[in-house]
Structures are given as C-alpha cells and as structure tokens.
C-alpha cells in the first residue's frame, strides 16, 4: 500500500453514490506535505518526458498540479470553468461533465498559454468517467501541443474513465486506484499496481 492509499484508508470517507470524500487532506483542506510527496511521485513517474507545461482544471486540480510543475520547473496552466472579464483574446474551450457535481461546464484556456511547441503533463485529483480529462486532452490537441502523460491522484477503477483514457493510448498514472468501496462498512479496496 502506498502513501496515498494509506492516507485514504486513514482519513477518507465513503459516501452513498460511489462518492469518496478526501476533503480533509486533498481537495478542500490540503496536507501540503502530502501534496509535495505527490508532486515528487508524479515527477518520478514521468521522468524523461520533455514536459514544458502542466495542465489541470480548477479548482481541485490546482493544489496537486502545483508541486508537480515545481518539480519539473515549468509553468502550471489551469483551465477555468467560466469566462471572466480578465480573460481576453482567443480561447481554447471544451465542455466537461463532472461526476461529483453532476453538472456540465465549459472550460477555457487562453491561447497565449498553450502552443504547438508545448509538451503537456495533465494532472487532476479524481478520475471517474473521464469527461474532464477528455476535455483537457481536446484543449491540448486544439493547441497542436503534445500530451506527454496524465497523472491522477485517485482513480475510481470500477468506473470507465481509466479504461477509456488508456485505450486512447495515453500514459495514465494514478497514485491510488480504488477497485471498490462500500458506504455501509466504509471499506475501500485498492487495485494492486506494479
């Protein structure tokens, strides 16, 4: 069992509807030491890749993506879920559906921050059905950039997202893959990873 799986067992809460709450350490209140450890682990897993940018989606992905970008020494770009007055110029857009929030958002990235010269590592907190990742991949492709890999903190292995992304041929590295969870007992089982 790795460091993130141990933390999920210790502090994660299984809720009805296949919801795993990790808000006490990952995506509401953040354990900064854990974030740094995750950044180092993703850096190790994607070592040798010519990463020039790290891309995530607001808001939960930012805390995880920041230490990854720091480890690679590259900028962090995050897709915004709404167009604001301070977003000017041409934008890459994609529609993404959130499993957790049960809604659709159009996410945007300024064309100033992604170009065909970029080699992008996509980072996010959760992978369930893969909609957010597919949106980020489409933004990278629209820029003519290259997806070098995808790093996920927690993958729900019993949902289709991981299979879809792997079948598209991307290197997908998930720090914890939940194979099953039971909200009546609070039991969480993880997939063995090599």
Image (cartoon, helix red, strand yellow):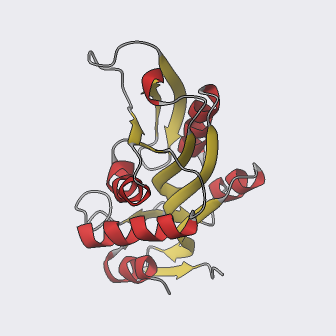
Look at the image and tell me in which quarter the C terminus lies. bottom right
Compared to 34, does 189 lie above or below?
Answer: below
Residue occupying the point 32% across, 72% down? 34
* Left-right relation of 67 to 127: left
- Name the image quarter holding residue 39: bottom left
The residue closer to the viewer here, 67 or 4, is 67
* Left-right relation of 22 to 132: left
Task: Give the tally of numbered discs.
Answer: 0
Percent position of residue 106, x then y:
47, 27
- Name the image quarter holding residue 184: bottom left
Residue occupying the point 53% across, 42% down? 132
Q: Residue furthest bottom?
A: 1
Percent position of residue 125, x then y:
43, 57
Percent position of residue 85, x then y:
27, 15
Regarding residue 135, the answer to whether it shows in the image is: yes
Compared to 169, does 184 lie above or below?
Answer: below
Residue occupying the point 50% across, 87% down? 1
Residue occupying the point 48% across, 57% down? 126
Regarding residue 15, the answer to whether it shows in the image is: no
Compared to 59, does 38 lie above or below?
Answer: below
Compared to 183, does 21 lie above or below?
Answer: above
Q: Residue furthest top?
A: 89
* Left-right relation of 118 to 16: right
The residue closer to the viewer here, 170 or 128, is 170
Percent position of residue 22, x then y:
34, 66
The residue closer to the viewer here, 34 or 182, is 34
């Amino acid at each position: 069992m790795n460091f993130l799986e141990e933390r999920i067992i210790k502090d994660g809460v299984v809720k009805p509807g296949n919801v795993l709450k990790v808000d006490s350490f990952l995506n509401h209140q953040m354990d900064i030491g854990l974030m740094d450890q995750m950044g180092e682990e993703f850096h190790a897993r994607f070592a040798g890749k010519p990463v020039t940018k790290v891309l995530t989606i607001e808001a939960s992905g930012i805390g995880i993506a920041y230490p990854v970008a720091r480890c690679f020494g590259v900028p962090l770009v995050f897709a915004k879920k709404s167009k604001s007055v301070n977003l000017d110029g041409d934008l890459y857009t994609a529609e993404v559906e959130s499993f957790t929030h049960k809604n659709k958002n159009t996410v945007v990235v300024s064309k100033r921050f992604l170009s065909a010269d970029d080699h992008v590592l996509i980072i996010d907190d959760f992978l369930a059905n893969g909609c957010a990742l597919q949106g980020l991949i489409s933004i990278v492709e629209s820029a003519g950039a290259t997806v070098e890999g995808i790093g996920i903190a927690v993958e729900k292995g019993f949902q289709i997202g991981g299979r879809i992304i792997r079948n598209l041929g991307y290197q997908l590295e998930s720090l914890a893959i939940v194979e099953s969870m039971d909200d009546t007992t609070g039991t969480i089982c993880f997939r063995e990873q090599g």
